[in-house]
Image (tube, grey):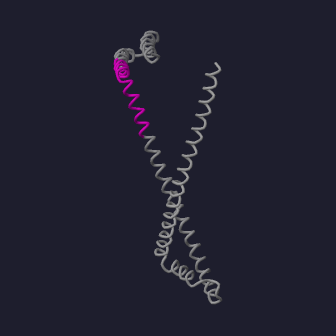
Amino acid sequence: MKLDSFIKNLGQTKVASAAAPPTKTAAETAAPAPAVTSAIRAALATIEQSKTASAPNSVEGDLKKIASETLAVEKTAEERHAHRLGEVMADGFASRLETYRAASEDLLSKQAAVVEGGAVSAEELALVKMARENPEAFLAEVQKGFQETMDQTKEAAERTYAENFDETVRTIHKKAADHYLAGYSIVAELAQTG
């Protein structure tokens, strides 16, 4: 709206100013100001019509574009974060593994001296040697032992749960029956006295 009034004033000002100062030449005063302003008005009218016709779509399109750009930026940031996190974790694992390797070498040398004194069993020493020489096999043995222990623990937990569940259900039924009978006797007394 303001732009339209500005253009109207611009056309009127040029016409008024062209008539007022006598110093301008005929070519300057005959400048196609009305043609320019009518062309600008026509262009503005076209823009206004296209804005009113496509305003919801352009806003929706703009919002979708902004959302997709934001999503892309967030996805890139998440990928970078995950990559950095992976690097940090891998470095930490490698550092910790090196610490364990150095400690196992130190422990192995100390245990070799202790085994001669009889403080460490040969089986324990064999495990330490296995961990040092073949870490994959040692890890497999540890995982196998862990899985066996977890299976035994799960079986024991299921047995205990079944035993305790039955006892708990019996206790709940007994308490519910006791409360029901107490309530029934109270209602029966009230019915007799009332």
> Residue 190's spot in the image, x, y percent?
63, 23
Q: Which residues are magenta?
A: 42-68
> Residue 162's spot in the image, x, y percent?
51, 54
> Residue 130's spot in the image, x, y percent?
51, 80
Magenta stretch encompasses residue 194: no
Residue farthest bottom in this picture: 116
Out of 25 and 7, give the one closest to the viewer: 7
> Residue 107's spot in the image, x, y percent?
61, 80
Out of 1 and 26, give the one closest to the viewer: 1
Say whether residue 170 is left or right of residue 14: right
Query: Number of callouts in the render?
Result: 0
Q: Report the predominant secondary structure element of the magenta stretch.
A: helix
| Image quarter (top left, top right, bottom left or bottom right) of the C terminus | top right
Q: Residue at x 57, y 69 (%)?
A: 96
Question: Is 24 rendered above or below residue 101?
Answer: above
Out of 39 and 112, give the one closest to the viewer: 112
Residue farthest front in this picture: 192
Magenta stretch encompasses residue 52: yes
Out of 119 and 15, give the one closest to the viewer: 119
Q: Residue at x 56, y 85 (%)?
A: 122
Question: Is 54 rendered above or below residue 94?
Answer: above
| Image quarter (top left, top right, bottom left or bottom right) of the N terminus | top left
Q: Residue at x 36, y 18 (%)?
A: 45
